[in-house]
Image (cartoon, rainbow, N blue to C red):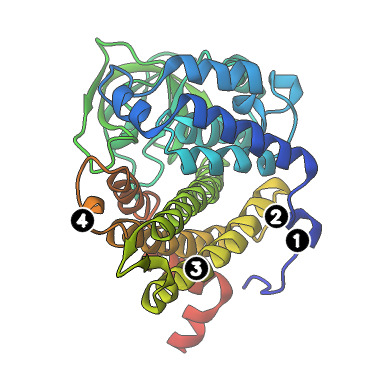
Amino acid sequence: MHSRRPEIDPQLLSETDEQRQLRTVLRDLYAEASGVEDVREHLAGPRGYDEALWARLAGEIGVHGLAVPEEYGGSGFTFAELAVALEESGRALYCAPLLPTVVLAAHALLLSGDRTACERYLPRIADGTLTATVAGFDADEPGVVAERENRDGWVLRGPADFVLDGAGADLLLVRAGTPAGPRLFACEPAPDTTWRTPRRVLDETRRQALVEFRGAPATAVGTAEEAESTVSATLDTGRAALAAEQLGGSGHALDATVEFVAQRHQFGRPIGSFQAVKHRLADALVALEAARSASAYATACVAVASPQLPVAACAAAVVCSETFRLATAEYVQLHGGIGFTWEHPAHLYVRRARAAEVLFGTADQHRARLAERVGLASRGAA
């Protein structure tokens, strides 16, 4: 049973001057280059995002390498700085594959402890020239199997469905079954051995695909003994990252709604002055502050590799998902008739909120895992 007492320095929960400056720079950049109409325009493109902006984020600001050690071409900061970038990307509904590339794939490589793989891939992730993702991480039993091709090589066979950016990623980190148990593999997909079929999903800003391996060459990453712990820690890191994104999206939804109700007049007064509207916005604000605390704690746990991360990640997943759902619902409803039209940006945020809340497990699954972690499940069974 894990201790219920926090093991994080409270100072880690506060924003530093550097993080505040990073937030300002990113918010200005997204306002300039990634408005809602820009997002809609790029969704119709082959990759689904602005590749020029992707290069600017990597080159001018160094977002992709924030949490990558300097020895692998990164800036050597921590996940706390990356979380600021993720929050701002969620606020702007930025649709490039930051989550699969910079969070999931990069951290899977780092957590694996495989220096050769890190030296090969992380510098290209950090400079924005390589996109990557993970496959088969959330399956109980791997749908992909790895077979020995020769003494040093492997080939992958089998499907992995709903892979984030699966149709476009340059690198796939795959959890595959072997006779000795699940293990991680790096695969640079080729059309003749890896079939990739885009899936139609609710949130068009976060593309997913069915990936079918048909004898795809792959290289083992890390050790077989550490594979499952690497996968588990990567998913918890992903949950913390997603919580930061959801926090940013919730903040935008609330700010946009407050601005609208202050401008929209009925019966000779702003609709925001009516008590019923005030109560709904107050509830959303309270939920947002709770989400901010949960996200900050999960972020700090990732940054210092705290053993409390599984608990913090589950709690953040539940709180931030529910807050994002509430904030986007009010975003639509308090905008009245215009809020119900597809042309209004609220609908893009609603779709992101609904898709994100099941991305790494449902709220009920997170609650069950959280109860087990803190000992409530076994106590209830007794």
Classify mark 1: residues with Cα within 10 Å, few (<14), some (14-19) or many (20+).
Answer: some
Please identify the residue farthest to the front as the structure is shown. Answer: 268
* Front one among 48 and 7: 48
Secondary structure category for the residue under label 1 = loop
Task: Please tell me whether mark 3 or mark 4 is closer to you in this view.
Answer: 4
Tag 4 and tag 2, C-beta contact below 8 Å = no
Task: Please tell me whether mark 3 or mark 2 is closer to you in this view.
Answer: 3
As measured in the structure, the alpha-carbon distance from the residue carrying label 4 to the one carrying label 2 is: 47 Å
Q: Confirm whether residue 199 shows in the render.
A: yes
Disc on the earlier residue, 1 or 4: 1
* Front one among 234 and 270: 270
**Disc 1 target residue:** 8
**Disc 4 target residue:** 337
Q: Amino acid at mark 2?
A: Ser
Tell whether 131 sits left or right of 307: left
**Disc 2 target residue:** 306
Tag 3 and tag 2, C-beta contact below 8 Å = no
Q: Residue 149 at x, y = what percent? A: 37, 15
As measured in the structure, the alpha-carbon distance from the residue carrying label 3 to the one carrying label 4 is: 25 Å
Give the number of marks.
Answer: 4
The residue positioned 62% from the left and 63% from the top of the image is: 293
In the image, residue 40 sits, relative to residue 271, either above or below, namely above
Task: Please tell me whether mark 1 or mark 3 is closer to you in this view.
Answer: 3
**Disc 3 target residue:** 287
Q: Confirm whether residue 223 shows in the render.
A: no
Task: Please tell me whether mark 1 or mark 4 is closer to you in this view.
Answer: 4
